[in-house]
Amino acid sequence: MGCNYDVIVVGGGHAGSEAAYISAVMGLKTLLITNSIHHIALMPCNPAIGGPGKGHVVMEIDALGGLMAKVTDQCTLHIKKVNTGKGPAVQTLRAQTQRDQYSLIIRKYLENTPFLSIFQGEVSDLILNSNGEISGVKIFHGIRFQCRSVVIATGTFLNGVIKIGEISYPAGRQGEFPANHLSQSLRQKGFETGRLNTCTPPRIDKRTIDFKKCDEQKSDDLPLCFSWESTPRVYEGSSVFLTRTNENTCEIIRKNFDRSPLLYHFSDSSPVRECPSLEDKVYRFPDRVSHLVFLEPEGEKSNEIYVQGVFTSLPEETQWQILRSISGLENCHIIRPGYGIEYDFILPTQLKLSLESKPIPGLFFAGQINGTSGYEEAAGQGILAGINAGRYVQNKPAIILQRDESYLGVMVDDLITKGVEEPYRLRTGKVEYRLLIRHSNADVRLAEYGYQAGTISLNRYRMIQEKKNIIAQEVKRLENTNIFPSVDLNRFLEKKHTNPLPEPTRINSLLTRPQINYYDLSPFDPDRPFLSPDILEEVEIQTKYRGYIERQIKSVNEFRQMENRPIPPHFPFDQLKILSREAQEQLQALRPTTLGQASRIRGVTPSDLAALLILLEKFRKEE
Ligand SMILES: Cc1cc2nc3c(=O)[nH]c(=O)nc-3n(C[C@H](O)[C@H](O)[C@H](O)COP(=O)(O)OP(=O)(O)OC[C@H]3O[C@@H](n4cnc5c(N)ncnc54)[C@H](O)[C@@H]3O)c2cc1C
């Protein structure tokens, strides 16, 4: 064929779109091959982006030059700042988007990016050269494309089987063919695969909902957006509504437990525990009958309403009964029934931190195929795999994000060191150094990597350096500037239920009081510079939480000393009788490259680590 590419990306979902886009932005000749161009970046579940943990990833994708944040901003219907009652570490945004628009806008970006071509087809096999390195892909209809690096991002399509009640049939998603040939090809090439499952709720016609019986949740009245490239906006007119299940709903579900493939028939695959089906919730919590149901719009011009909370794979007739038992939905009409899907994933312990596979050089994996669930998790891996596939072609070292600098780093490290037993989703609770890796500082945290990879421009890089300097200067000014007691100030402090000021105090010290924020003090701080809201937010966090931040930095430094302690590639884990048997087997199988990685492997105990530390030292002296 003579079609030669630097990077080929297989699958145009959220992972594949980001991977293909970023590789082309790096100037590499890239081909995105996907089953259906009409389904690029499709959201088969809720068209919502962000939320705790996930919003942080969206910001990190933006910081690295990816698409998700700016595209979300172009098709948002409803947006909220979440976790506002908690600390700044876990606050982030969640947007309800227009599903079709999201997909179209991503497609437009991909179609208009230089160096990027799209081909509609099913990849059925991988081609390796005589050194065992990836050298191309084969399309089911026969043609071949050559390349130096491949990113596989095939989502739920490998050996996908849809299950609704007693019915089951092969599919990648509802209405789409599965990718069975590639699944077989991967196994033939030595990859170990497992089975996972997920499900989606029914969509209903908004004209058949009695919204008067539901509680309205409006979009925030503050202007908000994800990307630095967008202008914050207030969104009106597309509210989310809340209702609840009741005893009748639960009784219908109980009577049909034995017809749910997610409860019984999926015995050889694991579901998403953090996003359970409604039948699972009723089964596991028999005393609870009132489960929240959110009615969320799918598009400005669409009548489809996503019924968040009613994830189900029960038979279609039961889905009608369930929905019609809920207040406000008594006369609802289902447009698309919910369904469950079971699919193959590759065990992510077969990958390196760069997302390159250990057995086949140049072959990268990203997204749901690695055992994750969620658009943001997929897109985040996509951008990382795309960057590293590009760097592989450029003969440059891979970009590895650390656990203490990004949510992406935490996710990839969890995947490759612990593996998955159920679909992996990012949560703030999985992140040790939450206060250091905030939604609000993703650009500052990752600018260096984006610039190094060539995915953000010099201009953008300079803007971020400038922002960093302004923040540092203002934090310093607050440390060095006194605020003086006055009648007005003390009256204000009393109103805020905090003690009056007896003597001049540094502004930063007053700001550590939880009742006071930076903005409040503006009448008493005449010399303050004008700051944009994003800078102001960072100044406030860095000042208010300084003690906590310093403590986390100290523990990161201690952790890094251990984390970065290298383990030689030929270190004989299998001969270390002092380690527990389980640790010995796991370490030998996964071959961590640092002590930090070893510490997170399932079955490796603190005493195994202490022993490893001594053995490493001994090994180093003997070498
Ligand atoms: C029924 C269902 C319910 C879900 N529920 C949720 C949920 O509640 N919450 C949540 O966050 N996420 C949910 N997800 C998961 C979410 O959709 C995925 O995590 C996300 O879309 C994964 O992105 P991806 O890029 O890895 O794969 P996908 O978005 O699945 O995209 C894969 C792409 O690869 C293409 N492809 C596959 N094989 C080949 C091949 N051999 N050759 C060429 N192209 C190929 C496909 O056509 C598709 O375009 C659900 C998914 C499904 C299907």
Image: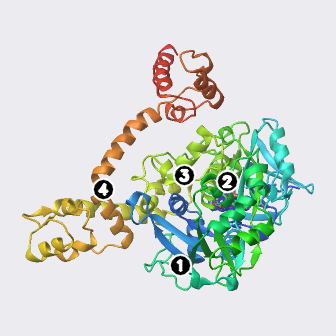
- Residue on which disc 3 sits: 408
- Residue on which disc 2 sits: 367
Q: From mark 1 to mark 3, how far is it between C-alphas? A: 35 Å
Q: Amino acid at mark 2?
A: Gly
- Residue on which disc 4 sits: 545
Q: Which label lies toward us, 4 or 3?
A: 4
Mark found first going from the N terminus, 1 or 3: 1
Asked if residue 53 is positioned above or below residue 395 in the image, the reply reads below
Asked if residue 134 is positioned above or below residue 69 in the image, the reply reads above
Return the residue nearer the eye: 64 or 191.
191
Mark found first going from the N terminus, 4 or 3: 3
Q: From mark 2 to mark 1, how far is it between C-alphas? A: 35 Å
Residue 551, quarter of the rendered image: top left
| Image mark for residue 619 | none
Number of marks drawn: 4
Return the residue nearer the eye: 453 or 202.
202
- Identify the secondary structure beneath mark 3: helix
Residue 53 in percent (x, y) is at 51, 57
Q: Amino acid at mark 1?
A: Asp
What residue do we see at 80% from left, 43% from top? 186
Is ligand 1 closer than 8 angstroms to the Cβ of mark 2? Answer: yes
What residue do we see at 50% from left, 78% from top? 219
